[in-house]
Image (spheres, coloured by chain):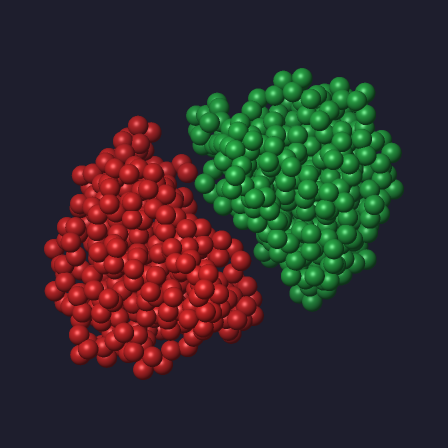
Chain colours: A green, B red
Amino acid sequence: MGAKNVCLMTDKNLSKLPPVQVAMDSLVKNGIPFTVYDNVRVEPTDSSFMEAIEFAQKGAFDAYVAVGGGSTMDTCKAANLYASSPHSDFLDYVSAPIGKGKPVSVPLKPLIAVPTTSGTGSETTGVAIFDYEHLKVKIGITSRAIKPTLGLIDPLHTLHMPARVVANSGFDVLCHALESYTTLPYHLRSPCPSNPITRPAYQGSNPISDIWAIHALRIVAKYLKRAVRNPDDLEARSHMHLASAFAGIGFGNAGVHLCHGMSYPISGLVKMYKAKDYNVDHPLVPHGLSVVLTSPAVFTFTAQMFPERYLEMAEILGADTRTARIQDAGLVLADTLRKFLFDLDVDDGLAAVGYSKADIPALVKGTLPQERVTKLAPRPQSEEDLAALFEASMKLY
Amino acid sequence: MGAKNVCLMTDKNLSKLPPVQVAMDSLVKNGIPFTVYDNVRVEPTDSSFMEAIEFAQKGAFDAYVAVGGGSTMDTCKAANLYASSPHSDFLDYVSAPIGKGKPVSVPLKPLIAVPTTSGTGSETTGVAIFDYEHLKVKIGITSRAIKPTLGLIDPLHTLHMPARVVANSGFDVLCHALESYTTLPYHLRSPCPSNPITRPAYQGSNPISDIWAIHALRIVAKYLKRAVRNPDDLEARSHMHLASAFAGIGFGNAGVHLCHGMSYPISGLVKMYKAKDYNVDHPLVPHGLSVVLTSPAVFTFTAQMFPERYLEMAEILGADTRTARIQDAGLVLADTLRKFLFDLDVDDGLAAVGYSKADIPALVKGTLPQERVTKLAPRPQSEEDLAALFEASMKLY
């Protein structure tokens, strides 16, 4: 890439750990000058993005290396984008309806993404998610242009992950697979763009994304529990690291829908909940947890379209579906998910992370701007539907 | 792409058929000037490549559309490459040891590949194969640079295919899947390149190519017989068209090995055999047929590395492997393949396409220059081994 002035982005926890050291050693060994930015916020916000963007603009870098989880990779994508487009307003590239959703036409610098968690798949996608503080809601920038040039999927980088980080990031993989396999198929999405160039990054499920979704789901079914249980299980952690990238290729192409759309207010409106194993100084519902808590309710709600896919997913997750009725497909998958989550010590629903019925209107309000993903659900949702889904997710077991 | 002077390549049979008409209509409708070159040779040679290259050089085109099977797509790749690199010798980019195997550093024009057969997967790969007449052997040009910009996988384009063309091109998909799933794994390939940039296009089996190989094999097992039997089975032909592209993504990354390596002299040394359903004026062993005829012998020979993969493939192809012994894995797969090929009316071995024991030295000699692929076999082969494989393939049943 001929880089002579690299920005290495990471967060404060990782900056002292082996994955960052490996990247720095490689840059030093190859004589490539670099500057470290380690002020990435776990679950980034528009202000934390802005700080990274200013750093990038001042640094005039010719390449980026992001070492970390989704927060770091997404921050680095935003920094690269806005440093390459210095006259843009921040909202220009943020997805509609909150942002202007402008297409990116400026060339970006190369970005090498090195994931250290096994969940986001951000190394494979053109998406950067952040908390928009003003509205207390998570939104995103979505464009093929911000997709990393290269992802380095090194399983050794996952060995430092504490158990709950493995579990929660694994739930993100699980939901990427389940949701992308059940998004509205690409040929039913409307309106159909008059020119392929205006096709959204999330284009609905299709024969290619399906391959990645199902393959990733098989790996999650086989390896997630092992990866959580034993930090030294390199085989399990390696496979989950690949599954994260595989599911990323799938959902980065097909999209996700309600679990993700509803997760953004669940994370964004967090009150006091502090997740175990996360070394941060602010309340936090980790992304993967906020996504998976509504999954039994969501898949019960959406199963009417292509129910045979729900039985297929339930079977991959361990259910015996030989005598299942097709009209029960959503319930069968929901029950299978509940069992899977219970075995993995997941908190008992939204109530366990600090929400009550009184919060439902705010949660619904925070979901409405997530059109980018909610419109990909295989069943349209009214505000009442969303309220019912949040209510059904207050307790899981 | 902003193209203003397009070269549309096809062959004489196709030039009057709907797939070419659809492409021409689209170019006309969009006001894009184009010139048709319909002199592609089925199973191209260095002279037929040269003719297309000269046409391309004179035309000074800014984009290419290739409508046809592997022969057309490969000819178009070569035309694009050498027209973009006018001072190169033809052998410069041909794979070693016959050519110089130089890396491609010139920029090529965009190439849109529209496959009309379901076999080669050439729309997804950086490979162009031809008969080198002087040595009577098939060799190739292999570089990521010649990979088409875009592939248009339109199942309607497969409805014109006669039954034997569907069968033979399907065998190519079958062998792409079987071979790429069993190539030497990428981490056992040596020597390991000191810089990733010198990594060969065929890098050995790996967790990504495996996904495509197995998925394509499942489709072949389910749909190939239906696609051959009934030209109106749009579902089966659509799935085989995708399987061809999927297997192409897999082998274009992992590589193939002995069935393909040994197929090149089988096609190249053809005497009088004229394949049914192929409207050409020269003797021809279609590529897919030349590949599949040695497959039972090859997979018996190579099964000692990773035999569990052979049982997995046999099971996908319909074998009951519950009581199979792991040391019989190669034989189990070979028997399964024989049954599969018999059901699809495959000629009874090399003898049936015109070869006898006396031809074996020439067939072995024609295999030796195929290092590009044979060195990816999971078991090294002496000349005696190759002779034994050809001999074992004289009769299949």
User: Which quadrant, please, contains the N terminus of chain A?
Assistant: bottom right
Q: Which of A268 and A8 is in front in this view?
A: A268
Q: In the rendered view, does A355 fall on the left or right side of B246?
A: right
* Residue B105 place in picture, x, y as percent: 44, 58
* Residue A79 place in picture, x, y as percent: 70, 41
Residue B221 shows in the view: yes
Q: Nearer the viewer, residue A254 or B353?
A: B353
* Residue B164 place in picture, x, y as percent: 21, 51
Q: Nearer the viewer, residue A367 or A96?
A: A367
**Residue A385's quadrant in the figure?**
top right
Report the residue at 45% width, 40% height from top. A207
Report the residue at 49% width, 53% height from top. B211
Q: Is residue B354 above or below residue A339?
A: below
Report the residue at 69% width, 56% height from top. A226
Q: In the rendered view, does A274 fall on the left or right side of B64?
A: right
Residue A79 shows in the view: no
User: Which quadrant, please, contains the C terminus of chain A?
Assistant: top right
User: Residue lying farthest front?
Assistant: A323
**Residue B328's quadrant in the figure?**
bottom left
* Residue B83 place in picture, x, y as percent: 32, 53
**Residue A27's quadrant in the figure?**
bottom right
Q: In the rendered view, does B384 fall on the left or right side of A132?
A: left
Report the residue at 20% width, 41% height from top. B15
Q: Is residue B330 above or below residue A365?
A: below
- Count of numbered badges drawn on the protein: 0
